[in-house]
Amino acid sequence: MKIELKPIGVIHSSYKKRQEAPYQGWFRPEIVSEIEIFKEHEAGLKDIEGFSHLIVLYYFHKSEGYTYQVKTPWDKELHGLFATRTSNRPNGIGFSVVELVEKKGRILRVKGLDAIDNTPLLDIKPYIPTIDSEENTKIGWLGGKIKRWKVKG
């Protein structure tokens, strides 16, 4: 089986190197990034401004190699690759749930994105809380190690 993905756009970010980007976009909720949709896909943006949040899928184009046991910023222990969100993966697909700030033509200005500059964009989907959020969830080995916070401002 052969799978071929083609970017539908590119992400423009103030993060120029991997080490500049936060581990997750919500660590830097004030940072605004731009998602540029290629002209041939512009019609697909119709009605997107009605959504406050989007799911952004992208390709970790600067990722190099991977291992099946990973150390994370939240723990000194090794964890299985698929129990982490590391960018070093067999298929370097990343995702973020972002806040849509504004749509201007083919440009989406968003908050909460952790991708570096010139990251290839694979897809965008609307975030729908009744579908995309579960109430009774467990966070495995991350329990007690990570908290999410919102910065008002």
Image: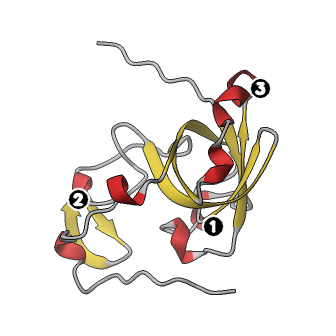
Residue at image coords 42%, 80% = 148
**Disc with the residue nearer the chain's start (3 vs 1):** 1
Is the Cβ of the residue at disc 3 closer than 8 Å to that at disc 2? no
Task: Tell me if mark 3 has few (under 14), some (14-19) or many (20+) residues whose alpha carbon lies within 10 angstroms of its own.
Answer: few
Name the residue located 34 percent from the left edge and 78 percent from the top edge: 74
Q: Is residue 127 left or right of residue 62?
A: left
Q: CA distance from mark 1 to mark 2?
A: 23 Å
Front label number (3 vs 2): 3
Q: Nearer the viewer, residue 63 or 107?
A: 107
- The answer to whether 119 is drawn above or below residue 39 in the figure is below
Which residue: 43% across, 52% down?
87
Amino acid marked by disc 1: Glu
Q: Is residue 94 left or right of residue 66?
A: right
Q: Which residue is mark 3?
A: 39
User: Where's the N terminus, which quadrant?
Assistant: top left
Where is residue 58 shown, x and y percent of the image? 53, 42
What color scheme is it?
secondary structure
The residue at which mark 1 appears reads as: 20
- In the rendered structure, find residue 83 and report the number of the disc placed on it: 2
Judge left or right: residue 65 versus residue 43: left
Who is closer to the viewer here, 119 or 148?
A: 148
Asked which secondary structure carries label 2, the reply is helix
